[in-house]
């Protein structure tokens, strides 16, 4: 069997899924370098995927990797842009307006540890979750809207930002 006949061999779609996954990983890694990736990249990738899965020929492995890279570039650049919108406020005193996403826990020093979502920083909507610790006697429950003042620091784990020693100025129950 020579190379020319091998390139038209039909492959199972699961093989292409693996190559697409590899391409996505490479694309996410490359998104750190390239920030200006628009939704057109995703549309091109979807078109390539439609072609790939309609034929499933061996030579289309190259298209599968390319489609994965385009998807990874798009998704990685979206995440980086969201993190950059929060990074503008790092090491500044801010007012967070947000909702409590989970039950409030209490730390070793009796501080409240609060996970926040739907966050606005100084009345500007930002994406992601935030971590806040505060000494407060206010009754705070899941889904409450809280107003928090403090110095915003870089996040950790899956948190985009954190505020330690925060001052909770107001709690609104939904």
Image (cartoon, rainbow, N blue to C red):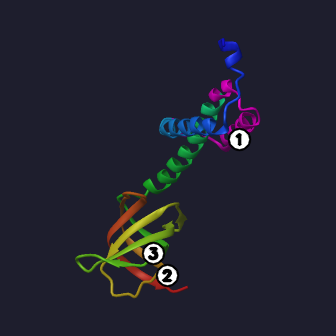
Estimate the spatial distance between the alpha carbons at disc 1 and disc 3, rounded to whole Å.
36 Å
* Residue 120 higher or lower than 90, as above or below: below
Q: Nearer the viewer, residue 137 or 5?
A: 5
Q: Nearer the viewer, residue 150 or 111?
A: 111
Residue occupying the far left of the picture: 109
Q: Disc 2 on helix, strand or loop?
A: loop
Determine whether label 1 and label 3 are within 8 Å by CB: no
Say whether residue 147 is magenta. no
Please give the residue where the numbered disc 2 appears in the rendered image. 144
Where's residue 63, x and y in %? 66, 29
First in sequence: mark 3 or mark 2? 3
Say whether residue 52 is magenta. yes
First in sequence: mark 1 or mark 3? 1
* Residue 155 higher or lower than 75, as above or below: below
First in sequence: mark 2 or mark 1? 1
Q: Which residues, given as a range, are shown in magenta?
A: 34-62
* Residue 81 higher or lower than 56, as above or below: below
Residue 36 appears in the figure: no
Q: Disc 3 on helix, strand or loop?
A: loop
Where's residue 119, x and y in %? 50, 68
Q: Nearer the viewer, residue 163 or 108?
A: 108
Q: Residue at x 64, y 42 (%)?
A: 38
Name the mark on residue 46.
1
Foreground mark, 3 or 2, reads 3
* Residue 3 higher or lower than 90, as above or below: above
Estimate the spatial distance between the alpha carbons at disc 2 and disc 1, rounded to whole Å.
40 Å
Please give the residue where the numbered disc 3 appears in the rendered image. 102
Where's residue 73, x and y in %? 57, 39
Estimate the spatial distance between the alpha carbons at disc 3 and disc 2, rounded to whole Å.
10 Å
Determine whether label 3 and label 2 are within 8 Å by CB: no
Relative horizontal placement of residue 135, taking residue 117 as reference (left or right): left
């Amino acid at each position: 069997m020579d190379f020319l006949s091998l390139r038209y061999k039909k492959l199972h779609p699961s093989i292409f899924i693996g190559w697409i996954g590899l391409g996505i990983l490479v694309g996410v890694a490359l998104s750190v370098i390239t920030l200006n990736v628009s939704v057109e990249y995703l549309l091109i990738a979807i078109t390539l995927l439609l072609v790939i899965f309609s034929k499933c020929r061996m030579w289309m492995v190259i298209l599968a990797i390319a489609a994965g890279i385009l998807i990874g570039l798009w998704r990685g650049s979206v995440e980086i842009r969201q993190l950059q919108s929060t990074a503008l406020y790092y090491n500044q005193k801010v007012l967070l307006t947000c909702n409590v996403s989970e039950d409030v826990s209490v730390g070793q020093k009796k501080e409240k540890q609060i996970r926040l979502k739907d966050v606005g920083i100084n009345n500007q909507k930002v994406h992601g979750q935030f971590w806040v610790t505060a000494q407060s006697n206010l009754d705070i429950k899941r889904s409450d809207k809280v107003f928090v003042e403090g110095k915003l620091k870089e996040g950790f784990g899956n948190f985009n930002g954190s505020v330690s020693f925060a001052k909770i100025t107001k709690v609104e129950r939904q």
